[in-house]
Image: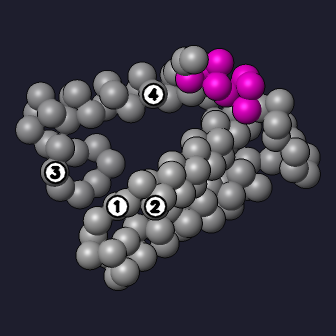
Amino acid sequence: MNFNEYQKKSRKTAVYPNKGKNFIYPVLGLVGESGEVAEKIKKVLREKGGIVDKRTKREIKKELGDVLWYVSQVSAELDISLDELALANIRKLISRKKRNRLFGNGDNR
């Protein structure tokens, strides 16, 4: 499955107020799910000495899937395909690498 196929299939499962005219709802969901990923990782550090066991990996995988779902919905609300998003991101990163600007602050390093 490619990103655009995922986006089309995931869009069929999107149920929220004013779908198609509401980027705020999926942005809030994205923040929430990202926080859940961070919470799982925090507990790995606190309770497991930084070691990710199989069970925790499965749990993090589920949360990352939810993050992907919300990224897909935000993108759909803004009429951006996931393929387009991924391509633009990799081009940006390759450009930064060529210019030795992967590290540092700011959007346009």
Q: Amino acid at mark 4?
A: Ala
According to the picture, the residue beneath numbered tag 1 turns out to be 52
Residue 58 seen in this snapshot: yes
According to the picture, the residue beneath numbered tag 4 turns out to be 86
Give the crowd class for mark 3: few <14, some 14-19, many >=20 residues within 10 Å. Answer: few
**On-image quarter of the N terminus:** top right
**Callout 4–callout 1 Cβ contact below 8 Å:** no
Q: CA distance from mark 4 to mark 1?
A: 27 Å
**Callout 3–callout 1 Cβ contact below 8 Å:** no
Give the crowd class for mark 1: few <14, some 14-19, many >=20 residues within 10 Å. Answer: some
Instruction: Identify the image quadrant of residue 33.
Output: bottom right
Q: Is residue 93 above or below residue 70?
A: above
Q: CA distance from mark 1 to mark 2?
A: 6 Å
Please name the residue shown 61% across and 20% down the image.
4
Label disc, if present, on residue 103 of the rendered structure? 3
Please name the residue shown 76% across and 55% down the image.
25
Pick whichever, 49 or 25, lies toward us: 49
**Callout 4–callout 2 Cβ contact below 8 Å:** no
Q: Amino acid at mark 3?
A: Phe
Farthest residue toward the bottom? 46
Q: Amino acid at mark 1?
A: Val
